[in-house]
Amino acid sequence: MSVTFTELLGGLRENETGDLAVTIPESWMQGRTTYGGLSAALCLAAVEKNHPELPPLRSAQINFIGPAGGPVTVSSKVLRQGRSVAYISVELVGEQGIATHAVFCFGAKRESRLDRDFTQSPSTPGPEESQSFFTPENRGPVFTSNFECKLAAGARPVSGSDKSEHFIWARNRDTAAVGTTALLGLADMPPPAVLPMFKEFAPISSMTWMLNFLDDEPSTRDGWWLMRSAAEHAKDGYSSQDMQVWNTDMKLVITGRQNVAIFY
């Protein structure tokens, strides 16, 4: 049975040890583990549930350590909380041990003489003009059924392309999934930028993910976000990639980086 993103996060409940617990259904799995974006979002949701008075999220550093599915628990710990900035560590643990470790940095606004975006916005077709990212022959992992995805530029996975960069419009099918936590849960949806270069399927696994959040309350029209992934290097079974997310007004809301293990 399909469980929406909103239902999953709303299902976080405190257990007998004081941690938060939830069960990950098959519809949110990526191979033998939980889809990484959901793992990260559950970590952030746990922080928001346990520490509701925090300032806006500024940065997230996430390590995907091991597989998890089914019953998981999430615990958080304040590392430091000052007058304007707080650092909180989170662990998501499954039956095989720790699966995801995250450190979130929250920071209050301060006055500044600088207010500029130094990153050029891309010129790509909108979601209405873009073709479906997945095809009947290439349907993607199970978790992708929770999202609607359009290819704005680049190539589809495992197509033998020479392109190492793609732009994908994506949105939650769950229209109630809005706000920073929902965006974090969506932002890991694009496959690694080197995957279109594969000529046949081979396993991949995200290892680390770093994101900077540039907007206190990110929003967009009709749920669509434009996501760019660009490989910078691939060697010895690992790939480094640069990532950005824009809303439909081409406002940059996230910058990020990811290290991916590739078995190709």
Image (tube, rainbow, N blue to C red):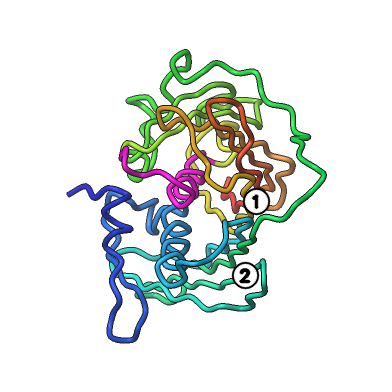
Q: Does 252 sit above or below residue 184?
A: above
Q: Nearer the viewer, residue 228 or 12?
A: 12
Q: Nearer the viewer, residue 246 or 191?
A: 246
Q: Residue furthest left?
A: 1
Cβ–Cβ below 8 Å for labels 1 and 2? no
| Dot label at residue 86 | 2
| Dot label at residue 172 | none
How many C-alpha atoms fall within 10 Å of the one at disc 1: few (<14), some, or many (≥20)?
Answer: some
The residue to which callout 1 is attached is 212
Q: Position of residue 189 (x, y in %)?
A: 47, 42
Q: Please give the range of residues in magenta.
A: 174-191
Q: Earlier in the sequence, mark 1 or mark 2?
A: 2
Q: What residue type is labelled 1?
A: Asn
Quadrant of the rendering where the C terminus is positioned: top right
Which residue appears at 58% of the width and 58% of the height? 207
Which residue appears at 28% of the width and 71% of the height? 13
| Residue 150 left/right relative to 119 | left
Q: Residue furthest top?
A: 129
